[in-house]
């Protein structure tokens, strides 16, 4: 390190890294980015290669385009893929609505009221964050079995209306705490009751938290393989992840292309979500900082 | 605090203080206090959550504790068998120990690697460079796809006999093998998948790095501290609360891993149970073999292990996590 002259601020030195250092950093970061994205690009490229080329021709650019994979995959595994996508949409939209309503209700209560045992209830709520789903999976299954809800979407949707995703309650509590209480009081002066305050003041102001909840609920529910595997048993009820596993059983043959084509399509909703909300997703996670 | 603010608001209003105004204001204040106390309102808002907490968490926890002492196949009523399930698990089920071995290996290797990579990349990203947002997005994307079946399918092909990874090794003249079907290496393909998805802790580290005080670094630099010293003497100590947070979350998460193990091994946990992660075995026992009593016992052991790890983490944190105050 060179000696530091009194008037050259170290801060400035940190910021204005030399050209060589900049180029080195960019090279390093691009290198890491390529490694990170390569498997995904490989999947995309394999999805448009003829089957014979997937493993013999490892480059990313196909010699010959084979969009037929998409057509085959779409009609391929048992049912048409459009059925699985429709089913996934039903489940995810139901879950999103459930989470937004029930978690915001609970969060409003925790953020704005004092009541007996509030600390204990709040602690219990945070405790459920750490509870592994596997620990309650079997009794929950027996409950839904006794309700004859197996092979319906109810076990995947109804719990979301009961605010079981404590992560989102916590996120919303933090958010509501940042909304000035004076607004509540002003509304109260005008004669609003707590329900009206929740509905007309809090809910519209917490839109950013609701958007974050919507995106993450959508992606996590869409990807949640375990619960769909457990609760959905008949082919025609299958969601996208389950539909994809049907390809796995028949990969002995030559259906790699269609499988990659449908895997690519399966990632599309998440990718679109990501591209639209990239900034909010990354920052929402950084500031609320939870869940892996 | 709230009342103080209300007072200020009231004082700021240049209304003539007639007795009736005063009464009105007092009434308002009492109403506010009562509302904050809540009455039955908070319970209205919490009603769905209460139903979920008792119906879908507390009751199931107790029920699974009861079931863990029974033979239960879902179709016939549960038969009380005492501690048989636990005894079988620990003394008579070699697969259970394969599972424990695979899971502990998975947690012990993937979590430190993932966190080290997350911190390293976060430090690279913590500067003003053109296109930094793009890099952040590229590194976060794989984590967002997380437990997706499609990702696991790709992984299966990448590490298969004629997959992408062996092509890569081929450039260096290294003869590859089928990494997925070898019991020695299959678990490491899952570990690599977990490490690849380092984006979530990376973003959290990045948020923490941005809050570190710049003047401390300037002072250290003036005193002649090099980058290595700065990292170990300043960055790491100041970052310990966030390291701790990430360690706790990632360990819990790693213990719960299911989808990659299921998809990569095609639901078998093979070869030779080398990828039979705990959650996968629990699923097989409960839902494929309908041994729900045994699976409930496994669930309770998992719950206690995770709680134990978390508790140990919190206790140990007293000795290495530094908070400002």
Image (cartoon, coloured by chain):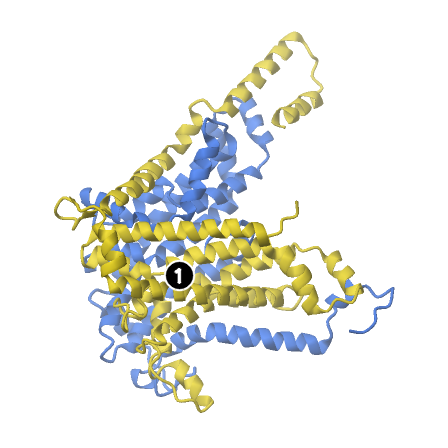
Q: Is residue B321 left or right of residue A110?
A: right
Q: Foreground residue, B244 or A169?
A: B244
Residue A204: percent from left, percent from top: 50, 39
Q: Quadrant of the C terminus of chain A?
A: bottom left
- The answer to whether A52 is drawn above or below residue B272 in the figure is below
Q: Quadrant of the N terminus of chain A?
A: bottom right
Q: Quadrant of residue A128?
A: top left
In the picture of the structure, the residue carrying the numbered disc 1 is: A269
Q: Is residue A287 left or right of residue B162?
A: right
Q: Foreground residue, B119 or B251?
A: B251
Q: Residue at x 20, y 66 (%)?
A: A78
Residue B15: percent from left, percent from top: 69, 17
Judging from the image, what is the letter of the chain drawn in yellow? Answer: B
Q: Residue at x 38, y 86 (%)?
A: B176
Residue A257: percent from left, percent from top: 30, 77
Residue A290 visible (yes or no)? no
């Amino acid at each position: 390190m060179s000696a530091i002259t009194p008037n050259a601020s170290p801060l400035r030195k940190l910021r204005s890294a030399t050209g060589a250092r900049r180029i080195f950093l960019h090279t390093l970061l691009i290198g890491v980015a390529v490694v990170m994205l390569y498997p995904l690009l490989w999947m995309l490229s394999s999805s448009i290669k003829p089957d014979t080329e997937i493993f013999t021709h490892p480059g990313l650019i196909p010699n010959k385009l084979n969009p037929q994979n998409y057509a085959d995959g779409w009609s391929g595994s048992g049912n048409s893929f459009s059925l699985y996508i429709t089913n996934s949409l039903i489940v995810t939209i139901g879950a999103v609505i459930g989470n937004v309503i029930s978690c915001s209700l609970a969060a409003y209560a925790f953020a704005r009221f004092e009541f007996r045992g509030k600390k204990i209830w709040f602690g219990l709520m945070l405790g459920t964050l750490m509870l592994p789903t596997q620990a309650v999976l079997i009794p929950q299954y027996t409950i839904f079995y006794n309700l004859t809800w197996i092979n319906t979407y109810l076990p995947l949707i109804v719990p979301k209306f009961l605010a079981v995703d404590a992560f989102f309650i916590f996120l919303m509590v933090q958010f509501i705490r940042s909304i000035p209480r004076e607004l509540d009081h002003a509304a109260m002066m005008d004669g609003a009751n707590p329900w009206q305050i929740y509905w007309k003041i809090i809910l519209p102001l917490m839109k950013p938290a609701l958007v974050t909840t919507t995106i993450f609920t959508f992606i996590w529910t869409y990807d949640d393989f375990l619960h769909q595997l457990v609760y959905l048993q008949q082919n025609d009820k299958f969601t996208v992840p389950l539909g994809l596993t049907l390809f796995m059983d028949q990969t002995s043959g030559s259906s790699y292309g269609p499988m990659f084509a449908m895997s690519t399509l399966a990632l599309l909703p998440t990718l679109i979500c990501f591209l639209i909300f990239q900034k909010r997703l990354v920052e929402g996670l950084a500031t609320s900082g939870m869940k892996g | 605090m709230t009342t103080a603010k209300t007072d200020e608001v009231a004082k700021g209003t240049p209304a003539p203080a007639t007795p009736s105004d005063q009464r009105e204001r007092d009434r308002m204040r009492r109403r506010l206090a009562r509302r904050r106390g809540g009455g039955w309102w908070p319970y209205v808002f919490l009603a769905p959550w209460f139903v979920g907490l008792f119906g879908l968490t507390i009751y199931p926890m107790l029920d699974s504790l009861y079931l863990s002492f029974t033979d239960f196949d879902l179709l016939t009523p549960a038969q009380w068998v005492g501690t048989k399930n636990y005894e079988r698990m620990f003394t008579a089920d070699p697969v259970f120990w394969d599972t424990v071995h695979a899971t502990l290996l998975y947690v012990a290797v993937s979590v430190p690697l993932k966190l080290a990579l997350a911190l390293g990349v976060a430090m690279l990203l913590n500067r003003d460079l053109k296109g930094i947002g793009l890099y952040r997005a590229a590194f976060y994307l794989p984590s967002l796809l997380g437990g997706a079946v499609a990702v696991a399918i790709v992984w299966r092909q990448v590490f298969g006999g004629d997959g992408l990874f062996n092509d890569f090794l081929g450039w260096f003249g290294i003869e590859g093998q089928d990494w997925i079907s070898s019991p020695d290496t299959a678990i490491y393909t899952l570990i690599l998948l977990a490490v690849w998805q380092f984006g979530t802790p990376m973003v959290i580290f990045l948020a923490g790095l941005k809050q570190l005080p710049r003047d401390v670094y300037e002072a250290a630099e003036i005193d002649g501290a090099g980058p290595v010293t700065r990292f170990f003497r300043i960055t790491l100590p100041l970052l310990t609360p966030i390291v701790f947070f990430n360690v706790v979350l990632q360990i819990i998460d790693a213990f719960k891993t299911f989808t990659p193990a299921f998809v990569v091994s095609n639901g078998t946990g093979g070869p030779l149970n080398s990828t039979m992660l705990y959650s996968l075995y629990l699923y097989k026992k409960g839902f494929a073999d309908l041994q729900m009593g045994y699976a409930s016992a496994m669930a309770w052991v998992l719950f206690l292990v995770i709680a134990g790890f978390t508790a140990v983490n919190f206790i140990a944190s007293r000795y290495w996590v530094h908070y400002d105050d």
